């Protein structure tokens, strides 16, 4: 008995977990970078901009990793079953890559500010 009717769910859609794992590791690296940047900004007595890097790490996890997994696990296996899945696929992909762009901008601003302050 299938609870979702004709909808198939691939809980471990290979090779998509490798991409999600890579972006989770990127978020962890950004959290580490935020800690180092915070210490450096404290040394030069500038405002604590590392908060933006922490927000960027969480945006990567919440707006890229999770929607990308949902697309790979739910929408790709069901493209033939339901034509609406193709629309959902593009909506979730758009959310994923928009979130990735926002997080890139959130990391860019404090990095450039630190570079300009210490030049």
Image (cartoon, rainbow, N blue to C red):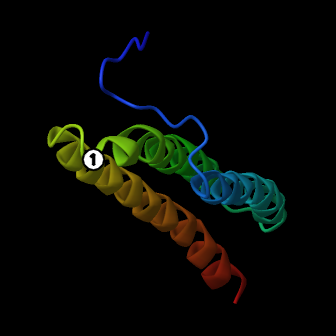
| Residue 61 falls in image quadrant | top right
Give the quarter of the figure containing the N terminus: top left
Give the quarter of the figure containing the C terminus: bottom right
| Residue 67 falls in image quadrant | top left
Q: Is residue 42 visible?
A: yes
Structural crowding at the residue carrying mark 1, measured as other residues with C-alpha within 10 Å and reported as few (<14), some (14–19) or many (≥20): some
| Total tally of numbered discs in the picture | 1
Give the residue at the far left of this rendering: 83
Q: Could you tell whether 30 is left or right of 42 in the image?
A: left
Vertical side of 118 occupied by 109: above or below: above
Residue at which label 1 appears: 79
Give the residue at the far front of this rendering: 1
Taking the spot 18% from the left edge, 47% from the top edge, the residue there is 87
Residue 111: image x %, image y %? 62, 73
Closer to the camera, 63 or 85? 85
Q: Could you tell whether 89 is left or right of 13 in the image?
A: left
């Amino acid at each position: 008995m299938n609870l979702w009717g004709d909808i198939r769910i691939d809980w471990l859609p290979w090779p998509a977990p490798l991409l999600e794992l890579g972006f989770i590791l990127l978020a962890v690296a950004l959290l580490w970078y935020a800690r180092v940047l915070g210490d450096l900004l404290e040394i030069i007595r500038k405002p604590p901009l590392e908060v933006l890097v922490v927000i960027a790490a969480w945006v990567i996890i919440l707006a890229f990793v999770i929607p990308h997994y949902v697309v790979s696990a739910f929408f790709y296996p069901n493209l033939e079953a339901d034509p609406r899945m193709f629309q959902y696929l593009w909506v979730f992909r758009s959310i994923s890559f928009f979130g990735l762009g926002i997080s890139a901008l959130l990391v860019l601003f404090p990095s450039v500010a630190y570079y300009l302050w210490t030049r």
